[in-house]
């Protein structure tokens, strides 16, 4: 029996990442590896999907290299789909920001993405195919007052994705950046006062899967997703 294609989600949690894992498994017939700093939180989800829950701090080059090396043993050639979904936020006036905390925000939102993309690209280019997806935010394209650190990281992430799309797409690797322009619904958060006022994580995940399925004659390098009531 042919092994199932492998999807890796880095920065996994119980929100969008869980929805992605379910769509990749049930709609895509893939096996999913969920990577996070605290993978024990993902064990139940991984077991239910016959997937993997693995430890990885995406800001540490050694962790990222070890993650991909481990997956090489599980799946020859590495993952066909890699999603960078790690994010970190920091709010505050520019006069009050702690430089060390800002550096950490940049490491999670941008540098970690580069480390993951580097390992993924090496394997995808060797195969001549693959899909590399990055989760952006409103802050990827709009800098808000009090959110300079987050905007710095997400602007950098978008720049990375755009540059990699131009570099890797002609070599058969599909790179795309997804702007999540709005709040994502979660059982532990207050619901929107308006119907469908928050993004449904399952609906977001289906859009990611659409990117994976796009024919190479009509690839998107970026899409924006927002609730119908969200201003933009």
Image: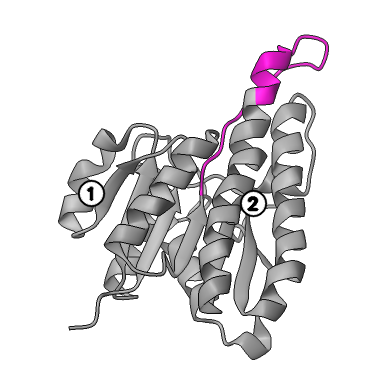
Which span is picked out in magenta?
Answer: 85-103
Q: Quadrant of the C terminus?
A: bottom right
Q: Residue at x 70, y 43 (%)?
A: 154
Q: Residue at x 35, y 34 (%)?
A: 188
Indicate the quadrant where residue 96 lies: top right
Q: Residue at x 41, y 69 (%)?
A: 77
Residue 72 spot, x, y in % from top left: 36, 60
Query: In this rendering, would 171 be left or right of 125?
Result: right
**Residue 179 visible in this rendered orientation of the protein:** yes
Q: Residue at x 64, y 28 (%)?
A: 105
Residue 144 spot, x, y in % from top left: 78, 34
**Magenta span includes 89:** yes
Q: Quadrant of the N terminus?
A: bottom left
Q: Which secondary structure dominates the residues rendered in magenta?
A: loop
User: Where 22 falls versus 158 (above or below)?
Assistant: below
| Residue at disc 1, secondary structure | helix
**Residue 90 visible in this rendered orientation of the protein:** no
Residue 109, label in figure? none
Of the image marks 1 and 2, the number of the one nearer the N terminus: 1
Crowdedness near tag 1: few (<14), some (14–19) or many (≥20) residues, C-alpha within 10 Å = some
Crowdedness near tag 2: few (<14), some (14–19) or many (≥20) residues, C-alpha within 10 Å = many
> Nearer the viewer's eye, disc 1 or disc 2?
1
The residue at which mark 1 appears reads as 45
Residue 181, label in figure? 2
Label 1 – label 2 distance at C-alpha: 26 Å
């Amino acid at each position: 029996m042919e092994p199932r294609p492998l999807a890796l989600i880095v920065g996994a949690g119980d929100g969008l990442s869980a929805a992605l894992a379910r769509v990749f498994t049930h709609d895509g017939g893939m096996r999913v590896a969920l990577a996070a700093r605290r993978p024990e939180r993902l064990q139940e989800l991984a077991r239910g999907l016959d997937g993997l829950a693995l430890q990885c701090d995406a800001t540490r080059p050694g962790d990222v290299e070890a993650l991909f090396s481990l997956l090489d043993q599980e799946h020859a050639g590495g993952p066909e789909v890699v999603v960078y979904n790690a994010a970190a936020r920091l709010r505050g006036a520019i006069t009050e920001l702690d430089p060390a905390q800002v550096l950490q925000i940049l490491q999670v939102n941008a540098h970690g993405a580069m480390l993951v993309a580097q390992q993924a690209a090496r394997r995808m280019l060797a195969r001549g195919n693959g899909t590399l997806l990055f989760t952006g935010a409103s802050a990827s394209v709009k800098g808000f007052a009090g959110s300079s650190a987050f905007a710095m990281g997400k602007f950098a992430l978008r720049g990375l994705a755009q540059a990699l799309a131009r570099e890797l797409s002609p070599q058969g690797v599909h790179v795309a950046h997804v702007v999540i322009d709005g709040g994502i619904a979660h059982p532990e958060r207050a619901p929107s006062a308006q119907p469908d006022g928050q993004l449904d994580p399952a609906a977001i995940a289906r859009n990611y899967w659409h990117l994976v399925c796009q024919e190479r004659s009509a690839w998107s390098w970026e899409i924006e997703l927002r609730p119908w009531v969200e201003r933009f």
